[in-house]
Structure formats: structure tokens, C-alpha cells
Image (tube, helix red, strand yellow):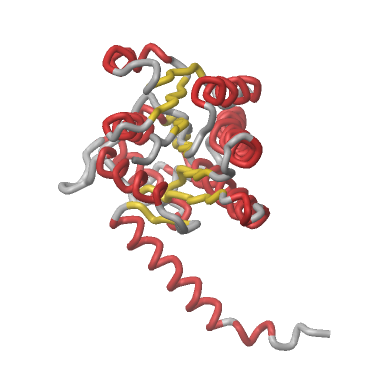
Amino acid sequence: MSSPKVWLITGSSSGFGRSVTELVLERGDIAVATLRTPEVLADLTAKYSSEKLLVLKLDVTQPEEITAAFDAAVAKFGRIDVVFNNAGYGVLGEVEGTPEEHVRALFDVNFFGATNVSKAAVRVFRDVNKPQGGRLLQMSSVSVYSGPAVLSYYNASKCALEGMSEGLAAELDPEWNIKITIIEGGAFTTSLLQNFVLTQPHPAYTKPTLAPAQIRSYLANGTLPPGTPSPARAAEVMCKIAALEDPPLHFPLGRDTVHVAKKKLAGLLENAEAFASWSDDLAA
């Protein structure tokens, strides 16, 4: 019988993070659940022993807290097998209308925080685990394929995370047995807007026929189409990905993401072929 896997999960208070934490525990693995407000998981700490669940305070914008969380997990369990890099939030606002301090705070969490978690994960996978190895799941978004209005900065933060993750994956020595998967999540029944900062509409973009006004109205309605999957179903897929010997670098999660990804890639290919000849005479 194989030993239980040790998962470290950031942003485990709700949504995907909470669902993955619950499923890991239900399956008999070990969860190191990190979040800014540990008391939110009081129901789980009452249900599971400290040998199965370690809850730690972690604000990913504080590098010293990231180091402390990984060190505590290693001190308690000796290794970390899977890191679900999930902590994040969004800012909803037009490019012209979003205050810069909101944008910088967004990148501090979604990019710099996630990058520091990634570096800590690789260090443990390579230098602590015996044998070497581990799985790093990066939580991204369908928005990297669609670039929706009023989510421009959120999308930018996820594109930055994806670019960093692709480069990091290319840098890793295959002998370390470290695999990275970027999970591009679509629409799920999470409390999405609870994790978004809502800015005031820019006056130039309030025309009802424009995309910013339409998307603001849709999100304010708060209703999702029938059949939208739950984050619990997403957690099942993430556990499957973590168990793969050779997982994909990119994983579109949800039928909507698959559809948008195919459309984006088809458009890129069509555009490249249409204008390929424009580069023929550029060589010296």
C-alpha cells in the first residue's frame, strides 16, 4: 500500500482550494491547508487529526510567511508531494479606470506571490524530498485565451503566471522528476465576485452596447448557466492530474475553456498562415 501524499494548498478558504483540501483528506492523503484566516477551516480541524491536516496562516504577499509554511510542512511530514498554487483574487475594471494601486496589489498576489510559492515548491521537491520529485499545479484561468473586457488586469496577471511557469518548466532538470501543470479553469459554481475588487465604471465605457457594461451587468446578476460544474468536480480532476506520471503543461479545465482554447488556437494559426509571406523577405 502506497504512503499518503502530502499536499500543500494555498488559498484553501473557499472555492477550488477548499474543495481540493476536502477531497485530499477524504482520500486519506495529508493536507497542509494555508490561508490568511485559519479559523475559517475550524470545521475541518475538528474533523481531522493533526496527523492528517495542518492549517497554517499564509499571506502569499509575505515571502517570509511562504518560507515558514513550507518549513513547517516539512518539519511535520518530512516532505511535500503536491503543491496546489491557488491563492489569488481579481480586479474588475476597465484598463483606463482601474487605480494603479489595485493593479499592483493584484500582481503582488497572483504573480509575485504565486512565483514565490513556485520557487519554494521546487526547492522542496528537489532538495528535501527523498526521492526527488513533486507536482506543482498552477491555478490559471480561461481568461488567458479570451481576454475579456473589465478583466484585463486579472487576465494579465494570469498570463504572467503562465509565462513564468512555462519558463520554469523548461529550466528544470528532468532528473528532478518535478512536473508543472497550468490549470486554466473555466466557469464553476464558486463565489467568484467575493474574491474580486469592483471598481467604479469609467465614464467612457458605460454605453450599454459596449462589452464593459455588458460584462459588468452579467457579473452583477450573479447567475451561472444551468449545468455549470461545482468546484468539487474540478478537485477530482486536479487529483487525477497530480497522479499522472507525465502530466500536461497546460490543462484546460471545463468545457467552456476547451471551446475557447480551440477557438483561440485556430484563430492564431489562421492569422499566422494568412500573413506568413510578409516575413519572407525580412532575412538579410
Quarter of the figure with the N terminus: top left
Residue sitting at x 34%, y 27%: 14
Q: Is residue 230 above or below residue 256?
A: above
Q: Which one is in front, 230 or 195?
A: 230
Q: Which one is in front, 234 or 264?
A: 234
Q: Is residue 87 visible?
A: yes
Quarter of the figure with the C terminus: bottom right
Residue sitting at x 50%, y 45%: 135
Taking the view exactly as shown, the residue that stands out farthest to the right is 284
Residue sitting at x 63%, y 24%: 67
Residue sitting at x 45%, y 31%: 9
Q: State the image quarter where residue 215 is shown.
A: top left
Q: Say left or right for 148 vs 175.
A: left
Q: Is residue 220 above or below residue 212?
A: above
**Residue 54 image offset from top left, x and y in percent:** 43, 19
Q: Which one is in front, 93 or 181?
A: 181
Taking the view exactly as shown, the residue that stands out farthest to the left is 226
Q: Say left or right for 220 vs 261.
A: left
Q: Is residue 202 visible?
A: no
**Residue 145 image offset from top left, x and y in percent:** 45, 57
How many marks do you count on the picture? 0
